[in-house]
């Protein structure tokens, strides 16, 4: 069985250089990533082999000609910074993207060569939740001399409190009524305060 990867994408970008106290960079990407790689049973695309024997049985190649694990059809990214009065700086970072795809697998028993994990439905039939990441920074400088100043910053992460999962406990479901169980998520909404001294 041959390995291959195909990627097709269109990227639209917009950049506004920092003038009149603000700047912005934004992009939209449409893409399609598909193929057949050695680690099609994994939830991630680029895990190294390190002696793993995945693919040694021909049954493991069933339904492997599909979307790859890092495929994200739609991605919108934005970064902006605004210089407010009183030397206050406001910046934001936004990432809105399609969720990564994953497969549904089953453990097949009773084979002469032993049990094997088989992809029941191709990668792309199911996807993780979409990415909805919005981070904001608000900061101010307090000058104590011409060159020395104190910086106070407040970082707000995941302002939408997205509960997007990053991985499943297992992709192997044995019964029709079984469902995937998530075991890793993005960190919840949080605030980080920073004090710095520059001289």
Image (cartoon, rainbow, N blue to C red):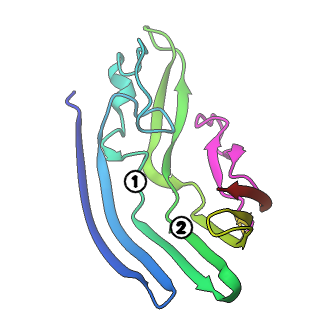
**Front label number (1 vs 2):** 2
Q: Quarter of the image holding residue 90?
A: bottom right
Q: What mark, if any, has residue 132 been given in the picture? A: none
Query: In the visual, does 5 lie left or right of 98?
Result: left
Tell me which secondary structure the magenta stretch mostly adopts. Answer: loop
Please state the total of marks drawn on the protein image.
2
- Where residue 56 sits: x, y (%)? 35, 16
**What kind of element bears circle 1?**
loop
Q: Which of these two is toward me, 174 or 140?
A: 140
Give the class, few, some or many, for how many residues have Cα within 10 Å of label 2's Cα (few <14, many ≥20).
some
Please report the bounds of the magenta region as a residue range: 161-188
Position of 95 relative to 57 (above/below): below
Query: Is residue 178 at least partly visible in the picture?
Result: no
On whether residue 157 falls in the magenta region, the answer is no
- Where residue 195 sits: x, y (%)? 77, 58
Q: Which of these two is toward me, 33 or 109?
A: 33
Query: Is residue 125 at least partly visible in the picture?
Result: yes
Q: Which of these two is toward me, 97 or 61?
A: 97
Q: Residue at x 23, y 32 (%)?
A: 3
Query: In the visual, does 94 lie left or right of 192?
Result: left
Q: Which residue is mark 2?
A: 95
Q: On the rendered image, what quadrant is the N terminus found in?
A: top left
Q: Which residue is mark 1?
A: 71
Q: Residue at x 68, y 80 (%)?
A: 88
Q: Residue at x 25, y 53 (%)?
A: 7
On whether residue 165 falls in the magenta region, the answer is yes
Position of 152 relative to 198 (above/below): below
Cα–Cα span, label 1 and label 2 = 15 Å
Q: Earlier in the sequence, mark 1 or mark 2?
A: 1
Q: On the rendered image, what quadrant is the C terminus found in?
A: bottom right
């Amino acid at each position: 069985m041959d390995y291959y990867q195909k990627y097709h994408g269109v990227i639209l970008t917009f950049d506004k250089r920092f003038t009149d106290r603000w700047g912005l960079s934004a992009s939209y990407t449409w893409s399609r990533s598909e193929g057949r790689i050695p680690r099609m049973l994994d939830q991630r695309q680029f895990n190294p082999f390190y002696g793993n024997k995945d693919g040694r049985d021909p049954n493991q190649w069933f339904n492997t000609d599909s979307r790859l694990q890092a495929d994200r059809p739609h991605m919108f990214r934005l970064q902006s910074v605004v210089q407010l009065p009183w030397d206050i700086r406001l910046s934001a970072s936004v990432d809105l993207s399609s969720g990564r795809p994953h497969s549904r697998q089953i453990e097949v028993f009773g084979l002469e060569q032993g049990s094997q994990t088989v992809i029941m439905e191709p990668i792309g039939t199911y996807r993780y939740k979409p990415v909805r990441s919005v981070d904001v920074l608000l900061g101010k400088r307090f000058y104590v001399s011409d060159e020395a100043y104190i910086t106070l910053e407040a970082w707000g992460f995941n302002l939408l409190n997205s509960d997007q999962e990053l991985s499943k406990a297992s992709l192997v479901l044995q019964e029709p009524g079984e469902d995937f169980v998530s075991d890793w998520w993005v960190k919840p909404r949080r605030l980080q305060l920073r004090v710095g001294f520059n001289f």
